[in-house]
Amino acid sequence: MTGRHEGAPTAPESYGVTDLPALPKLGGLFTKGVAGSAGKRPKGEVRLPEVVYRVARVDTSGEGAHLAAYLDLLGEPSSDVLPAGFLHVLAFPLATAVMVRGDFPLPLLGMVHLKNVARVLRPVRLGETVEVRAWAQDARAHRRGVQVDLVAEVLVDGDLAYQGVSTYLAKGFTAPDGAAPAQESPREEWTAPLPTARWKLGGGTGRAYGAVSGDQNPIHTSSLGAKAFGFPRAIAHGMYSAARALAEVGPARRGEAYEWTVEFFRPVLLPGTVDVAIRYVSDVDAVGSGSAGVAREGAAGGFVYDGWRSGKGTRNFRGTVRPL
């Protein structure tokens, strides 16, 4: 396979491929995941299913209205190019299908979304027929349980066009081989910078994003549903916040090929006001290590974004957008 970015994960050789006739619907998957979560409790080491789900032909020509609604909600300019956030939405049901398998050892309910790393290697345009793949890999120790990567890919004519790696945490579980948790980097001292934008998010934000993403998890769409999981009220989808920041960087500045990352700290409560700062740095990889803005030899510049509760020092998320 050509067009794979250096450092992009590949499915382990031991994994088999299971072909599905079409992308599944999230509603049915979520119902299955809720039902199956009750029986998935910590009991021995976590072993992931060695399978890649694949839908060989997904015709995007019928996605015009869906794409337009997504672009409008997130603030992306009108275009026939599918931004990384929309490609995440397109492939997410297939990754979810992996997570609700009977032999997937972690419960869908209660999984904590920690971070995302996505790369667009070439533009995907409305009307192209694509291949979508998804699998789970790298179950590893976290101080509060096990974290696992769900990898989703979109290919055009056999070439990798998009890859997204979503990292989730399942609390209380044990990593394979009883591995000790990886040493976590200490959280650096952080002071809110001058905001470049202020988002006033209404109580219906979760329902609006749920309508375009298909993710109708009640923690995002209902105060009662959110309270059942310990939140004071509904919370915004993490990928809504990340995709809106990506939109504010804009297509011209991120280019046709780019890397987009996000790390989540605290949920954004709805309704709420989020201050956002987007700034250019000469060394994206140094952000968070105390060296932001100091260029290393061969460093790659790009944009860094932070989001925090308006008027407070409560940091909700941070991420990067870097042209490739």
Image (cartoon, grey):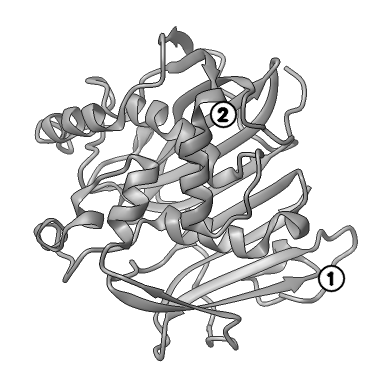
* Residue 34: % across, % down: 15, 36
Q: Residue at x 56, y 14 (%)?
A: 13
Q: Which element type, helix, strand or loop, lies under badge 1?
A: loop
Say which of marks 2 and 1 sits in front: 2
For residue 222, side relative to residue 3 (left or right): left
Disc number placed over residue 295 in the picture, else none: 1
**Residue named by callout 2:** 153
Q: Which of the marked residues, 2 or 1, is nearer the chain's N terminus? A: 2
The answer to which quarter of the image holds residue 18 is: top left
Q: Is residue 172 above or below residue 159?
A: below
Q: Is residue 223 above or below residue 79?
A: below
The answer to which quarter of the image holds residue 292 is: bottom right
- Distance from disc 2 to disc 1, alpha carbons, whole Å, reads 32 Å
Q: Residue at x 53, y 88 (%)?
A: 191
Q: Residue at x 59, y 55 (%)?
A: 76
The answer to which quarter of the image holds residue 223 is: bottom left
* Residue 104: % across, % down: 28, 26
For residue 235, side relative to residue 142 (left or right): left
Q: Residue furthest right?
A: 297
Q: Residue furthest bottom?
A: 311
Label 1 Cα neighbours within 10 Å, binned few <14 / some 14-19 / many ≥20:
some
* Residue 298: % across, % down: 89, 58
What is the three-letter code of the residue carrying label 2?
Glu
Disc number placed over residue 87 in the picture, else none: none
